[in-house]
Every structure is written in C-alpha cells, then in structure tokens.
Amino acid sequence: MPLSLDSRVAIHEDAVFRELDGEAVILQLDAGMYFGLDPVGTRLWQLIETHGTLRPVLEAALREFDVAPDVLEQDLLDLVSTLAEKRLVVVQ
C-alpha cells in the first residue's frame, strides 16, 4: 500500500526515542542503529506518536510551522518513508 496522508503509522516496538535540546536521537534496538532528527523532524515524530494517522499530523504541524502545506506534506511523507525503511516506524 502506497504511503499517503490516510496511512496509519505506529512507532516500531524496537525504536527508542530520546530528545536532547529540541532534537532527537532514535535507536533501533534490533539493528543497533542510531538515527537523528532535527527540531522539525522531532516535532513530527511526536505528532506521529500522538495521532498515528498522517492527516492529523499534517494538520497539527501546519498550525505550528510557517510553511506551505504542499511542502510540509511532502516533507512528512519523505520522513515517514525514511523512518519506515530504517524500521523505526511501521506503516499500517
């Protein structure tokens, strides 16, 4: 199933998230791999944890960030795609 705003996303059970001064590090326990997020990526991760489905994540992020909706939508989909490839989230 292709990734879309209607996709439901869950944090992978082997992903451990730690925030440090507005940025985050995620450890994929099974692979022993670290992945860093900038402040925007960190906030999107938090919104994914809260909402699960990407459409409300985008809507919440648009209220917080001064960015064009189409740009933020593409950035969100790209981030989730990368996180899924690295087994940090599961797209359902």
Image: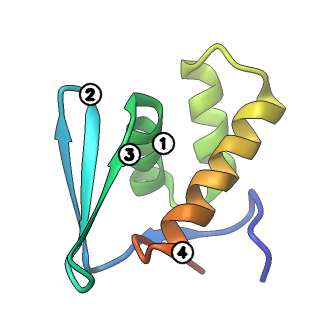
Question: Circle 3 sits in a helix, a strand or a loop, which is it?
Answer: helix
Asked if disc 1 and disc 2 are in contact, CB closer than 8 Å, the reply is: no
On residue 84, which mark appears?
none
Pointer 4 residue:
85
Label 1 crowd (10 A; few <14 / some 14-19 / many >=20): many
Measure how far apart labels 1 and 2 are at the Cα level: 12 Å
Asked if disc 3 and disc 1 are in contact, CB closer than 8 Å, the reply is: yes
On residue 46, which mark appears?
3
Pointer 1 residue:
44
Residue 42 or residue 38, whichever sits in front? 38
On residue 22, which mark appears?
2
Label located before the other in sequence (1 or 2):
2
Residue drawn at point x = 74 percent, y = 69 percent = 3
Measure how far apart labels 4 and 2 are at the Cα level: 24 Å
Question: Circle 2 sits in a helix, a strand or a loop, which is it?
Answer: loop
Measure how far apart labels 2 and 3 are at the Cα level: 11 Å
Residue type, label 1? Leu
Residue drawn at point x = 18 percent, y = 26 percent = 21
Q: Residue 16: which quarter of the image?
A: bottom left
Please state the horizontal and vertical placement of residue 87, each as a whole percent of the image.
43, 77
Measure how far apart labels 4 and 1 are at the Cα level: 17 Å
Q: Is residue 88 above or below residue 92?
A: above
Q: Nearer the viewer, mark 1 or mark 2?
A: 2
Label 3 crowd (10 A; few <14 / some 14-19 / many >=20): some
